[in-house]
Image (cartoon, rainbow, N blue to C red):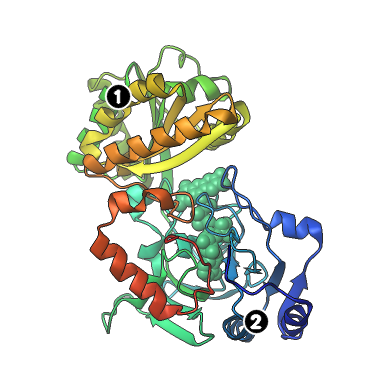
């Protein structure tokens, strides 16, 4: 039972009176905002509000503290850990309409944006100035920069460019109390005080509502080239990755797909010969055309020396686009083909990816599930889909997920490289965090939010 106040007619009237908030409570919208992209996760909110002004968010949070109702910040609802689901009901606060690019300052190589800006819109806008905003979650055409900051989103380019946190220089946030703070800087460096920016980035909407971001930009790479390498087995593919990185090459993408994924998307690949393949690497290099031509050729040689049966350089941009379409189709096809799909995004040390993936058939046999593995091999970040033909298999699949996470942690890895804890990883948190760390983190939450009104029940139950 939740101890929160219900949204009564009186509270609704007080919320509706706040200038800069649009109140929505038709059943269709409430239903839509009761879920994100986390398979199987749902809870109906009592009210949805769209904010267009920071002052409105401040007023809403002050009211939430007075009346004790939950407020759940939401970007564009693509999260995969259930972070934006209102599990205690209350008010979902949508930032989608705060979507202005406030400034692009080419000479300072920064942009200032509101949280609801779509990742791809920011990328396209800065591109016109010869600049690049590197963080590239695969959902970049549907997710917001605010959501990316709140989850510290990653993507294929992390292997070279790092995660969202590396590009947030500063931010503005409304604290659960309604106070407004600025954290971080507008400059390339800054070390004054504790790293509040670093704490808010990745806090999954539990410590503050991010209302403005100052992001770091880099010069747009002049060109990009793509290589696809097919291997008869997964382990030589993973060995090749280590060799590529150890020899000092720095691809902008180092993705892999296992044989199960290849079976699923083989029909849309722009070349033949995948039936016999045990793994595929999708590798890109970006930079000056001559440099990357040499780099991709050297990487191609490493793949062939390492046992690749074929290594193809993309002949043109259309072929390259097709490869990314295929890469993005994997999750969708897995979801379409299996009634039960539990998505994990574990990370293991680089040198242990093959060893980890080779354990998966044993879990499959023991649990009666089918496991797909793909993702950011250059970061050791593996997306696992633990699937079954019936949702009745959920209890045993979940027990299997727990065992897999235990294995990952024992190997020196972590349970989530990108998606965060939200509600999805909560049952496993104590496997990774020590009691001391949990105690400190809970104390931080209470310091920011003593009445637990901001996104309650996330990260920590
Ligand atoms: C097909 C697909 C591919 C994906 N690929 C990737 C990937 O490659 N890498 C990756 O990291 N993720 C990926 N994701 C997951 C998801 O897109 C990211 O987590 C993304 O950052 C969420 O952004 P959003 O705007 O949709 O946030 P939401 O889902 O709306 O919210 C996510 C979390 O952030 C909080 N939040 C949102 N906005 C704010 C704000 N302004 N202030 C405070 N808290 C806020 C919410 O409370 C919630 O906890 C993928 C998802 C899909 C569906």
Q: Are marks 1 and 2 in contact (CB under 8 Å)?
A: no
Looking at this view, name the residue that lies furthest to the right.
26
The residues bearing labels 1 and 2 have C-alpha atoms spaced at a distance of 51 Å
The answer to whether 70 appears left or right of 245 in the picture is: right
The answer to whether 50 appears left or right of 176 in the picture is: right
Secondary structure, mark 2, is: loop
Looking at this view, name the residue that lies furthest to the front.
1
Q: Quadrant of residue 199?
A: bottom left
Say which residue label 2 marks: 53
Looking at this view, is 277 or 222 the one in front?
277
Q: Quadrant of residue 421?
A: bottom left
Looking at this view, name the residue that lies furthest to the top.
276
The C terminus appears in which quarter of the rendering?
Answer: bottom left
Say which residue label 1 marks: 358
Mark 1 Cα shell of 10 Å, populated few (<14), some (14-19), many (≥20): few
Looking at this view, is 264 or 456 the one in front?
456
Looking at this view, name the residue that lies furthest to the left.
246
Q: Is residue 270 visible?
A: no
Seen at 40% across and 73% down, the residue is 445
Q: Position of residue 249 (x, y in %)?
A: 24, 42
């Amino acid at each position: 039972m939740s101890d929160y106040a219900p949204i009564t007619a009186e509270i609704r009237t007080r919320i509706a009176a706040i200038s800069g908030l649009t109140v929505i409570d038709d059943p269709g919208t409430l239903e839509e905002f009761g879920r994100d992209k986390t398979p199987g996760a749902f809870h109906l909110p009592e009210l949805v509000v769209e904010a267009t002004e920071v002052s409105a968010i401040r007023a809403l949070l002050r009211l939430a503290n007075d009346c004790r109702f939950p407020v759940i910040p939401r970007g564009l609802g693509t999260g995969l850990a259930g972070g934006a689901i209102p599990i205690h009901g209350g008010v979902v606060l949508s930032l989608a309409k705060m979507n202005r690019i406030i400034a692009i300052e080419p000479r300072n190589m920064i942009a200032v944006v509101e949280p609801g800006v779509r990742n791809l819109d920011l990328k396209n806008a800065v591109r016109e100035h010869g600049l690049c905003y590197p963080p590239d979650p695969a959902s970049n055409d549907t997710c917001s920069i605010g959501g990316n900051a709140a989850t510290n989103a990653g993507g294929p380019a992390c292997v070279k460019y790092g995660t969202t946190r590396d590009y947030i220089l500063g931010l503005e946030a409304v604290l659960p109390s309604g106070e407004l703070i600025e954290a971080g800087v507008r400059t390339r460096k800054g070390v004054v005080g504790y790293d509040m920016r670093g704490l808010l980035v990745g806090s999954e909407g539990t410590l503050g509502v991010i209302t403005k971001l100052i992001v770091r930009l880099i010069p747009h790479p002049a060109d990009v080239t793509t290589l696809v390498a097919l291997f008869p087995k997964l382990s030589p593919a993973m060995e090749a990755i280590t060799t590529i990185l150890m020899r000092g090459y720095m691809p902008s993408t180092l993705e892999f797909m296992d044989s199960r994924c290849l079976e699923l998307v083989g029909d849309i690949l722009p070349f033949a010969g995948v039936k016999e393949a045990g793994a595929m690497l999708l590798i890109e290099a970006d930079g000056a055309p001559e440099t990357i031509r040499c780099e991709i050729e050297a990487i191609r040689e490493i793949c062939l020396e390492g046992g690749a049966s074929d290594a193809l350089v993309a002949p043109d941009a259309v072929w390259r686009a097709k490869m990314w379409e295929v890469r993005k189709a994997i999750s969708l096809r897995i979801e379409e083909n299996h009634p039960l799909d539990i998505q994990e995004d574990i990370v293991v040390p680089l040198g242990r990816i093959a060893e980890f993936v080779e354990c998966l058939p044993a879990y499959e046999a023991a649990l009666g599930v089918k496991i797909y593995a793909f993702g950011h091999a250059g970061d050791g970040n593996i997306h696992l889909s633990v699937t079954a033909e019936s949702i009745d298999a959920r209890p045993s699949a979940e027990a299997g997920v727990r065992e897999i996470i235990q294995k990952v942690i024992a190997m020196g890895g972590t349970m989530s490289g990108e998606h965060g804890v939200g509600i999805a990883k909560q049952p496993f948190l104590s496997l990774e965090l020590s009691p001391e760390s949990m105690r400190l983190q809970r104390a931080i939450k209470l310091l920011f939010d003593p009445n637990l009104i901001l996104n309650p029940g996330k990260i920590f139950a």
